[in-house]
């Protein structure tokens, strides 16, 4: 476990009361108790009992090694080396700081030991530039069980070197595992009861000084009886245990607590660093006031007329002319089509008839996407004699007016005459199209941006709601929504407030720092208005909870936030959001409370979050939320609730490797698991449930399971066999 600055640890009992028994040279034959002792093979209960949940701890079969049982040796060692490796029988090992060795009878009667067993006393280790600090968030309970002036706590630093796979030192290092000492490593100077009392006395004095200072400021210092010192309650007690010895690298040791009663060690508590994170997030819904009334477009009928030219002998209409038709019609539905399609008069009758009919069909086909089953189509076709007679007056052959149509056709077959008349004939090759339509907007956004004008507040509300929906669909440019301006009258106030909410939701990712500040100032201005709408108060609450870091940078006070939450959720409309709003408040504030040492508020917030989220079936069933909630609780040093969150998911929903691995790390802290060596069993079972990589990774890195779990030789052998070549946390730390 790396000694990281301000690393957070929490103590639960890792050492059982009735466990593997070893004799110590100092103890005159009295067995010493600790959970992590060496044994030659897996106990019988590892095979018999498959229970692995917290609700059935009593079903675990306790394992108790007999005093006369042989200590198993590695296959690589000779049995004849045993006496030499363990030390001469009867040889006493002097303990530091005049401590006395472990003793089963003293342990059984120790109130300090029982307090740890029952989780009444909690301890943490903080690593600072000053050194290792012992901190208890249950100071009064701790002092209550420290009955004697030589009752206290000592920090034991354990080096991982002997735990590495293949290390012969595993069997020779002095310590509880080999039955050769009551300590496993370097022991820092014990912290006795008076050190804890000294810190609490200092806290009390500082509190009284602060109260006196407040009294002076309020003018009540003349009467000292008005100074209130009765409300002081210690949040925690902290004592500097000392620096890490120079011969122990801060990166290569892990810590234990030695529990001391009258200078005698009565128990050992192991530590591990379970890593969580602060990724838990939640949010309230934004609730802009939308209207369902559609935009009021004009429904006046319109008629359009077009002249469509064709090339000689072609049935395809002129492309540019048809583009004009398309642009005109894109927001209209055609009710009726009237087409007069013509061919020039010089053509042969049968061929001409086929030509002008095909031209009419091609126009109808082009307009097909603008028509439906209600559209009526009227087509007239023929040779364009009407236009021909109009052209005669300006032509070189006005005398043809008296000629027959047959004679005129014959004359136009002559190349010389046809050449002169080609420009007139080209005008005849066309179609006259008349369309009767009604408005039917297809590209609504484009049409609204170009043509729509809101003339009333109701129309403006419909336009705003339309733009908001376009924005949510990702079709609106970032600045379009906020570019709409409303008259500064009371009638339009709600639209202005609504626009602030919509602009935030759609455009905040594009805001500059100045826009953020302006938005916040506008919001504060609205909140100060006596008649500010409840909807805007709700939005302000939502904004504050969602943009916590920004709002805190603007020096907005937490008490004002709580007041706003209470004010908003007192209304019937938003009452259902009260619990969720408070949960988001705690998600934002708890890390700060923990850092400031405000443990009462941390506990209050943790209890609230746990109750709120575990009461919701959709949260319990959601893998990501369950894992995020558990990791958040871990960061808040609330390990029991975190265990329950993960345990509930594994029991009620499904097996998940990521949740199960975090669960395995967490339950290493649970007293019930350690009390009957159930944790070793659980890890063995996990080797069958998890992939080899996942199982081996449990023991790796700063957030892995404490390497002292390998005090259990059977588990160590399994790990060294299963994870050959990977190493473990111990090996990693000694590189």
Image (cartoon, rainbow, N blue to C red):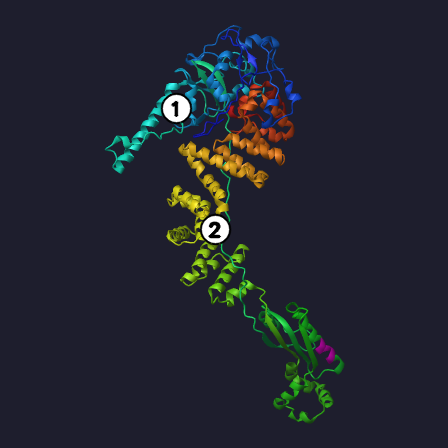
Q: Nearer the viewer, residue 728 or 348?
A: 728
Q: Residue 238 at what x, y percent from top left?
A: 39, 25
User: Dot 2: what SS?
Assistant: helix
Query: Magenta segment, which residues?
Result: 352-357
Q: Is residue 734 above or below residue 548?
A: above
Q: Residue 26 at what x, y percent from top left?
A: 49, 8
Left-right relation of 20 to 223 = right
Q: Nearer the viewer, residue 360 or 540?
A: 540
User: Dot 1: what SS?
Assistant: strand
Left-right relation of 202 to 302 = left
Camera-nearest label, 2 or 1: 1
Residue to which mark 2 is pinned: 509
| Residue 150 painted magenta | no
Q: Quadrant of residue 403?
A: bottom right
- The numbered dot on residue 609 is none
Q: Are marks 2 and 1 in contact (CB under 8 Å)?
A: no
Left-right relation of 156 to 84 = left
Residue to which mark 1 is pinned: 239
Tell me the crowding category of disc 2: few under 14, some 14 to 19, or many 20 or more residues within 10 angstroms, Cα based.
Answer: few
Q: Main secondary structure of the magenta part?
A: helix
**Which residue is outermost to the right?**
350
Residue 134 appears in view:
no
Residue 668 appears in view:
yes
| Residue 355 painted magenta | yes
Q: Residue 689 at what x, y percent from top left?
A: 64, 30
Q: Which residue is painted at 63% across and 30% down in the image? A: 690
Q: Which residue is painted at 65% across and 85% down in the image? A: 387
Q: Residue 563 at what x, y percent from top left?
A: 41, 44
Find the distance from the CA under tag 2 to the CA under tag 1: 47 Å
Tell me the crowding category of disc 1: few under 14, some 14 to 19, or many 20 or more residues within 10 angstroms, Cα based.
Answer: some
Q: Quadrant of residue 62?
A: top right
């Amino acid at each position: 476990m790396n000694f990281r600055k301000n690393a957070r640890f929490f103590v639960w009992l890792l050492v059982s009361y009735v466990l593997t028994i070893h004799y110590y040279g100092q103890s005159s034959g009295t067995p010493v108790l600790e959970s992590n002792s060496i044994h030659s093979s897996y106990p019988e209960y590892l095979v018999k009992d498959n229970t692995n949940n917290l609700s059935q701890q009593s079903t675990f079969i306790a394992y108790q090694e007999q005093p006369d049982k042989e200590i198993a040796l590695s296959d690589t060692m000779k049995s004849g080396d045993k006496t030499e490796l363990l030390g001469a029988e009867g040889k006493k090992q002097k303990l530091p700081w005049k401590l006395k060795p472990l003793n089963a009878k003293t342990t059984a009667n120790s109130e300090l030991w029982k307090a740890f067993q029952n989780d009444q006393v909690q301890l943490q280790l903080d690593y600072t530039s000053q050194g290792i600090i012992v901190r208890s968030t249950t100071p009064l309970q701790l002092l209550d069980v420290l009955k004697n002036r030589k009752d206290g706590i000592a920090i034991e630093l354990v080096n991982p070197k002997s735990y590495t796979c293949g290390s012969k030192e595993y069997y020779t290092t002095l310590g509880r595992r080999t039955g050769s000492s009551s300590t496993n490593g370097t022991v820092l100077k014990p912290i006795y009861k008076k050190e804890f009392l000294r810190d609490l006395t200092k806290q009390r004095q500082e509190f009284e000084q602060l109260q006196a200072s407040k009294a002076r400021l309020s003018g009540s210092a003349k009467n000292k009886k008005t100074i209130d010192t009765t409300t002081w309650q210690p949040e925690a007690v902290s004592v500097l245990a000392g620096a890490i010895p120079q011969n122990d690298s801060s990166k290569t040791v892990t810590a234990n607590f030695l529990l001391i009663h009258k200078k005698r060690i009565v128990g050992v508590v192991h530590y591990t660093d379970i890593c969580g994170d602060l990724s838990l997030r939640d949010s309230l819904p934004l609730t802009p006031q939308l209207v369902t009334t559609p935009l009021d477009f004009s429904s006046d009928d319109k008629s359009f007329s077009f002249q469509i030219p064709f090339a000689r002998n072609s049935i395809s209409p002129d492309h540019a002319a048809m583009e004009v038709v398309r642009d005109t019609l894109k927001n209209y539905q055609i009710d009726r089509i009237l087409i007069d399609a013509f061919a020039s008069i010089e053509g042969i009758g049968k061929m001409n008839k086929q030509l002008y009919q095909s031209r009419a069909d091609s126009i109808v086909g082009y307009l097909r996407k603008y028509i439906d089953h209600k559209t009526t189509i009227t087509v007239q076709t023929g040779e364009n004699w009407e236009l021909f007679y109009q052209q005669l007056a300006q032509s070189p052959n006005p005398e043809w007016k008296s000629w027959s149509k047959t004679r005129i056709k014959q004359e136009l077959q002559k190349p010389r005459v046809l050449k002169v008349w080609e420009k007139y004939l080209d005008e005849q090759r066309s179609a006259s199209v008349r369309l009767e339509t009604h408005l039917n907007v297809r590209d609504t956004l484009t049409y609204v941006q170009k043509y729509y004008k809101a003339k009333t507040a109701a129309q403006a509300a419909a336009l705003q709601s339309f733009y908001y929906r376009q924005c949510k669909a990702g079709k609106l440019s970032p600045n379009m929504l906020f570019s709409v301006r409303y008259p500064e009258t009371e009638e339009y106030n709600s639209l202005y407030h609504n626009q602030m909410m919509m602009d935030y939701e759609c455009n905040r990712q594009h805001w500059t720092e100045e826009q953020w500040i302006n938005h916040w100032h506008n919001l504060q201005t609205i909140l100060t208005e006596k008649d500010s709408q409840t909807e805007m108060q709700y939005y302000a609450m939502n904004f504050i909870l969602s943009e916590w870091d920004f709002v805190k940078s603007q020096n907005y006070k937490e008490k004002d936030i709580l007041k706003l939450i209470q004010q908003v959720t007192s209304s019937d409309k938003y009452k259902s959001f009260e619990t969720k709003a408070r949960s988001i408040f705690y998600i934002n504030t708890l890390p700060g409370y923990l850092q400031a040492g405000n443990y009462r508020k941390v506990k209050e917030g943790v209890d609230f979050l746990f109750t709120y989220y575990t009461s919701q079936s959709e949260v319990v069933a959601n893998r990501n939320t369950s894992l995020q909630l558990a990791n958040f609780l871990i960061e808040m040093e609330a390990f029991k609730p975190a265990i329950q969150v993960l345990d509930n998911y594994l029991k009620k929903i499904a097996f998940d490797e990521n949740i199960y691995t975090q669960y395995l790390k967490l339950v290493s802290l649970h007293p019930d698991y350690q009390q009957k060596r159930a944790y070793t069993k659980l890890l063995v079972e996990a080797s069958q449930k998890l992939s080899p990589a996942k199982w081996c990774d449990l023991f790796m890195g700063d957030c892995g399971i404490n390497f002292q779990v390998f005090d259990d030789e059977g588990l160590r052998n399994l790990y060294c066999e299963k994870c050959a070549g990977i190493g473990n946390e111990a090996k990693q730390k000694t590189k």
